[in-house]
Amino acid sequence: MNSIMGVSLIGFARGQVGGGARPYDPNKREFFGPEFTWARPEEVSSAIQKAKDAAPVLAALGHKPKSDFLQLIAKGIEDNSARIIELATRETALPAGRIQGEIGRTTGQLRLFAKLVEEGWWRDVRVDHADPTRKPVPKPDVRSMLVPLGPVAVFSSSNFPLAFSVAGGDTASAFAAGCPVIVKAHQGHLATSELVGTLIVDAVRQSGLPEGTFSLLFGPGRTVGIDLVTHPAIQAVGFTGSRSGGRALMDAAAARKQPIPVYAEMGSINPMVILPGALVDRSQSLAVGLAGSVTLGNGQFCTNPGLIILEAGSQSDIFLQQLGSELAKVIPAAMLTESICHEFIAGLAKFTELPEIKVHTRVDVTNGQVGPTLLTTSGQDFLGQPALLEELFGPTTIAVLCNGIEEIIEVVKALDGQLTGTIHAGPEDNPQIKILYPILAGKVGRLVHNGFPTGVEVCHAMNHGGPYPASADGRSTSVGTRAITRFTRPMCWQNFPECLLPEELKESNPLGLFRLVNGTWNKDLPE
Ligand code: NAP
């Protein structure tokens, strides 16, 4: 069994022991386990040098060994699920069922990328044959595909200790692309991070891959994290967390001699418009569903619906009563970390002090256990108070009561970039929907119709990202197979003889890939 030592994993080597911080149990409000030592600058450099050495080996790795490597990580996590659940529930205060679900999501994600790697179509191979007879100039033979960027730094998130952490979506998609990964662990789940990190190292060894394929560093973002992002060998960054943290990394990356992409997913208030038709015959079920979505994971989801936009009137008043009653039933729970809890309490106090805000329902905070809150405001007050555009990370939502559809449209137009946007409507709302969806679409990365934004499906078609500030780069997703493209770049081979072309681009198509040949998608299988 892999023992928790509290040190960074620098490829196959362990960092020095020295003392930093201990894992924290938010339920018991006590520290436990060994002291974790923050990575020293020379350990950060060593991890980066090893990653740099590993990069060309991984870039040249065949589809099958890369796929097998991802499968091995998934198996290691599954085989150690009991221990992972024990550590992660203790460190995050999330229930065992949620962690079990996250194990399934994490291993499913790794296996989805393993299958993708084996199928190879993610390479986006394009072949344009030469035409020496073309006038006035002959056409060259041009072939291209996506190739890995090189070493990637991943900042794991606090709110998904597995699925967006050490072996989460960023790591899985970077490995699938053929990039070495260095993870900067989140301090909210140190022991879980080390355990999962050792499982990846085991998979690297068993697969015979270079040790620089993976490293895990413990330490503060402002030192260890910034050292990583500013090192010339790092070629891209994946991040999930606060807007201030993401922005700091974007700025540091942009200030480098060679600026690099930072794929930061930084939070969202996920507006939900509820049109009158939705309240006619499903007001109560909508209240139950929405209360569940607002309080899922104690509100610590990036897709948490933090803004409800609806028309003022008696139907909406009844709905808010129903929603308030459902929220009041929710048992308060500890938040992921002490600092997230402090930020939530301080943020809620700031909101409730605003003259524009009324507290509709509130379950008080006791002994570090936080319950849900429903706030209300008018459309006019919302439009006059920019502070209400900020994310309040926790089990809270604000209902904006508007004076008719025109004001709803104004409120939607005033929103920043978001991960998701939802409309609940009945058949009689069709004319309004047709106006609202195009406006909402300009603000978000995912539209949800008559549903709830929490629960992000990991699949080929998913988009989890949105216009800034929801994401650093709204052209990318951090969930689903398209996430792989973040860690790639297109590369073109012109007039190459067959023997010098990579397998993917050879005329004989030995890998049997779907390719765009002379403008037509086909799978020209080998003879
Ligand atoms: P965070 O404070 O942004 O931290 C995430 C990671 O970034 C940590 O590893 C942190 O390092 C690092 N970091 C933060 N600021 C940095 C900086 N200026 N320079 C370099 N690295 C930096 O996020 P969090 O701890 O997960 O939660 C804090 C708040 O973020 C929450 O209260 C919530 O508002 C928001 N959040 C939003 C989402 C979302 O998806 N919407 C998810 C999680 C959190 P350290 O080890 O030094 O902390």
Image: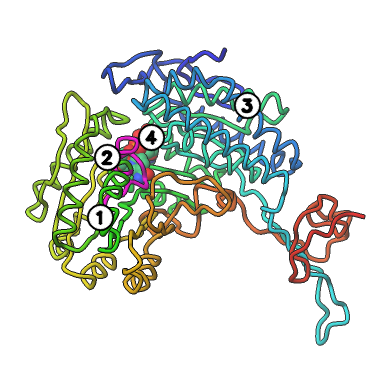
Q: Position of residue 15 (x, y in %)?
A: 51, 21
Farthest bottom residue in view: 136
**Image quadrant where one finds the N terminus:** top right
Q: Closer to the observer: label 4 or label 1? A: 1
Q: Nearer the viewer, residue 62 or 413?
A: 413
Does label 1 point to a residue whose CB lies under 8 Å from ligand 1?
A: no
Mark 3 and mark 4 in contact (Cβ < 8 Å)?
no
Which label's residue is closer to the chain start, 4 or 1? 4
Q: Secondary structure at mark 4?
A: loop
Q: Is 393 situated left or right of 122 in this image?
A: left
Which residue in the structure is indicated by mark 4? 158
Q: Mark 2: give few (<14), some (14-19) or many (20+) Cα within 10 Å.
A: many
Mark 1 and mark 2 in contact (Cβ < 8 Å)?
no
Q: Which mark is residue 75?
A: 3
Q: Which kind of residue does numbered mark 3 sit on?
A: Lys
Residue 417 vertical placement versus 223 (above, below)? below
**Image quadrant where one finds the C terminus:** bottom right
Q: Which kind of residue does numbered mark 1 sit on?
A: Ile
Q: Which kind of residue does numbered mark 4 sit on?
A: Ser
Farthest left residue in view: 355
Q: Which kind of residue does numbered mark 2 sit on?
A: Gly
Q: Position of residue 229 (x, y in %)?
A: 47, 43
Q: Mark 1: give few (<14), some (14-19) or many (20+) Cα within 10 Å.
A: many
Q: Which mark is residue 308?
A: 1
Alpha carbon separation for disc pair 4 and 3: 23 Å
Which residue in the structure is indicated by mark 2? 394
Query: In the image, which residues are magenta?
Result: 293-308
Q: Secondary structure at mark 3?
A: helix
Answer whether residue 384 is magenta in the image: no
